Image: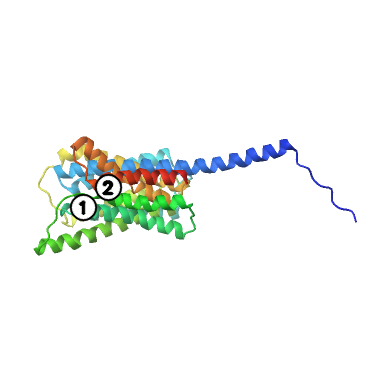
Amino acid sequence: MVGFPSVRVSASERSRSWVFDRFRSLRTSGVVIVGFVLALLAALAYGSSDFAAGVAARRVAAVPVAVVAQTVGLLAIVAAVLVYPGTGPSAGALTWGAISGVGLGVGSLALYHGLSIGAMSVVAPVSAVLAAALPAVVGLLGGETLPVTGLVGLVVGVLAIGLVSATSTPEPTSGFGASRYAWAPIGFGTLSGMGFALLFIALDRAGTQTGAWPVLPSQAVALAMTLALVVTGGHRSTRSWRPAVPLAIFTGISGAAATLLFLVATGTGRLAVVAVITALYPAATVILARVFLAERWTRLQMVGLLAAATAIALISVS
């Protein structure tokens, strides 16, 4: 019986094979790290946008700030499309972009209204946690996998979001005000979180092949919803918008940049990770408030900031 001759692999060939395998592994890891960094930048941009919007809303009102910010954001995305057109618009990407705009509009308006009734300590954490948790669940159910350190990092990140959003503002404990503060913040926070979760999930489905095109209908739909609220009489303000315009412009630019960064991050990283890291944006808002407004941190916020740093470290090493 004649056997097949054995094939000997030289040491140099084994070395080249190891180098190529290592290169492919590093290239894959590098892509994931890019998505992680982009998500961090998105969180910083969203946090800066919310900080500027909050300061501007103190000078005027939430809805006028939203109108100016979303108008500027739409113009910024038009410019982004010219620079980052990808393969051009497609029906699927534009449709998912429009759906994400519904989430952006609902999330923003619900958040602003919830904050306007003085329930920041409840609305912000509920909104941020849902915005992180729902896309993470969708990503994991969709087949995304993470090592144990990554899963632990996601859990710690969700806890950090709630902690850094917490404040020590007292709420009514009896009477009609107690009922209002007990249920309205939870309702608007839940609606806001579901809206932002829809924004994240829909942009992930839109993909990055078409460049910045999906964000264009997203901003347009959100602006249309806000304008509809103004036109139908849902908001009336007798104060001048002028004092808040510069901050509102910054809000629009940074918010649009954050959405675009998140979109690109979903093309290079896992949705479960990108959504949780991006939803750490309240940490940036809290830090900016400390630096520029001299606001004091509560113990829960300090613990939350440490938890956020821990979550970032755990997810980065995974």
Percent position (x, y) of residue 131?
33, 54
Disc sitting over residue 167 in the figure = none
Note whether 73 is above or below 110 in the view shown: above
Which element carries disc 1, helix, strand or loop? helix
Callout 2, which amino acid? Val
User: Image point 30% across, 56% down: which residue?
Assistant: 193
Percent position (x, y) of residue 303?
29, 46
Is residue 206 something one can see in this rendering? no
Disc sitting over residue 121 in the figure = 1
35 vs 233, nearest the viewer? 35
In the rendered structure, the answer to whether residue 266 lies left or right of residue 114 reads right
Is residue 194 something one can see in this rendering? yes
| Quarter of the image with the N terminus in it | bottom right
Quarter of the image for residue 316 reads top left
Earlier residue among tags 2 and 1: 1
Disc sitting over residue 164 in the figure = 2
Percent position (x, y) of residue 209?
48, 47
Q: How many marks?
A: 2
Which element carries disc 2, helix, strand or loop? helix
